[in-house]
């Protein structure tokens, strides 16, 4: 099973300058993928703090674990009352947009109507 380092929230906070530069200067594709990745790692860190320290916790948080997907982490974080309903809904919308960009055979851009439609209906 693949194991990635679980970043502590303090480390993610230190990376925020680089993140903000990317979000301000990058392409739409970079903004969506990198921004969502940061949120995913933040949820992973939040859940890791909530769980007991064990190999089982590491395994289920790994990319191949049953809460290795961003959408699943959103769901669990909400169900455990670690995030509020509005945050949960926003994160699920971001997950939808990320999937549109990640699974497009073209360079993702907000100029595509589908991405704008998702944002408009939320």
Image: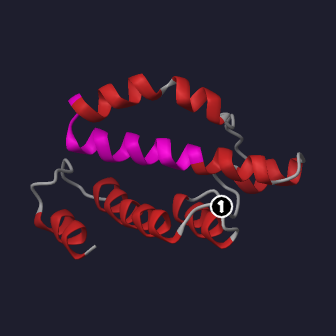
Q: Is residue 38 left or right of residue 30?
A: right
* Magenta stretch: dominant secondary structure: helix
Q: Is residue 17 magenta?
A: no
Choose top left, top right, bottom left or bottom right for residue 65. bottom right
Residue at 66% of width from left, 61% of height from top?
A: 67
What is the count of numbered marks?
1
Residue 26 versus residue 81: which sits nearer the camera?
A: 81
Residue 30's spot in the image, x, y percent?
Answer: 29, 39
Residue at 52% of width from left, 65% of height from top?
A: 71
Residue 84 position (above or below residue 24): below
Choose top left, top right, bottom left or bottom right for residue 82. bottom right
Residue at 19% of width from left, 70% of height from top?
A: 120
Q: Is residue 14 left or right of residue 50?
A: left
Residue 5 position (above or below residue 40): above
Query: Which residue is most to the bottom?
Result: 121
Q: Which residue is mark 1?
A: 82
What's the image's color scheme?
Answer: secondary structure
Residue 26's spot in the image, x, y percent?
Answer: 24, 32
Q: Is residue 37 magenta?
A: yes
Residue at 26% of width from left, 58% of height from top?
A: 104
Q: Is residue 80 left or right of residue 101?
A: right
Q: Is residue 106 left or right of residue 22?
A: left
Q: What secondary structure is found at the residue carrying circle 1?
A: loop
Residue 56's spot in the image, x, y percent?
Answer: 86, 54
Residue 72 position (above or below residue 28): below
Q: Residues within 10 Å of mark 1 (few under 14, many from 20)?
A: some
Quadrant of image for the C terminus: bottom left
Highlighted magenta segment, given as a residue range: 25-42
Residue 70 versus residue 17: which sits nearer the camera?
A: 17
Residue 19's spot in the image, x, y percent?
Answer: 39, 30
């Amino acid at each position: 099973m693949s194991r990635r380092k679980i970043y502590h929230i303090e480390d993610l906070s230190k990376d925020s300058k680089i993140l903000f530069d990317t979000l301000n200067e990058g392409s739409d594709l970079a903004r969506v993928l990198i921004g969502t990745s940061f949120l995913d790692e933040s949820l992973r860190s939040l859940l890791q703090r909530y769980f007991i320290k064990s190999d089982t916790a590491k395994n289920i948080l790994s990319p191949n674990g049953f809460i290795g997907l961003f959408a699943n982490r959103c769901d669990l974080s909400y169900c455990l009352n670690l995030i509020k309903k509005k945050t949960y809904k926003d994160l699920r919308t971001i997950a939808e947009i990320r999937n549109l960009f990640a699974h497009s055979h073209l360079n993702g851009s907000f100029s595509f109507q589908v991405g704008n439609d998702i944002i408009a209906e939320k």
